[in-house]
Image (tube, grey):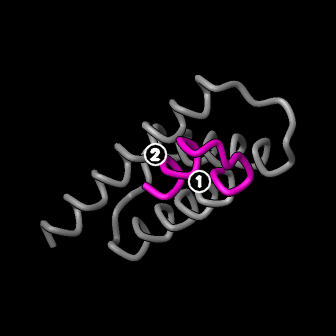
Amino acid sequence: MKAAKAWAKKWVKKAGHELQVAAVSLEHGFVWAGQKLEAVMINVIDDARHIAGKLIEGVGWATDEVGKAIEYLGREIDKLGKAVAGL
């Protein structure tokens, strides 16, 4: 949510930092919950980190790829929430 809010306000570097934090937190959350990281999830996390790096550096990003990274990462966060709720 923080990445999406920063992106909506056109705070590019802040959006990058928030996206990076979300990706790392998601990965750690799945490990903490004892959930297996699926290939799709690993790709989403890797893509989010890659795009976050571009935003932080201020080079080579496209609006649609940022939006997709935020959306896909959000879906994976929802999966984590459901996994934790089922523990």
Residue 50 rendering spot, x and y as whole percentages = 72, 43
Which quadrant: the C terminus? Answer: bottom left
Q: Disc 2 designates what residue?
A: 73
Extreme-bottom residue of the structure: 32
Above-or-below relation of 73 to 64 = below
Residue 10: mark: none
Residue at the image position 79 percent from the left and 42 percent from the top: 54
Rendering quarter of residue 20: bottom right
Residue at the image position 58 percent from the left and 45 percent from the top: 9
Classed neighbour count for the residue bearing mark 1: other residues with Cα under 10 Å, few (<14), some (14–19), many (≥20)? many
Residue at the image position 51 percent from the left and 30 percent from the top: 68
Indicate the amino acid at tag 2.
Leu
**Given contact means CB atoms under 8 Å apart, are the residues at marks 1 and 2 in contact?**
yes
Residue 49 rendering spot, x and y as whole percentages = 67, 49
Over which residues does the magenta segment extend? 1-15
Q: Nearer the viewer, residue 11 or 55?
A: 11
Q: Nearer the viewer, residue 73 or 17?
A: 17
Q: Is residue 6 magenta?
A: yes
Indicate the amino acid at tag 1.
Leu
Q: Disc 1 designates what residue?
A: 19
Above-or-below relation of 54 to 84 = above
Q: Nearer the viewer, mark 1 or mark 2?
A: 1
Above-or-below relation of 82 to 66 = below
Residue 69 rendering spot, x and y as whole percentages = 54, 37
Q: Answer with left or right where residue 59 lies relative to residue 53.
A: right
Q: Main secondary structure of the magenta part?
A: helix
Residue 37 rendering spot, x and y as whole percentages = 44, 54
Residue at the image position 40 percent from the left and 76 percent from the top: 32
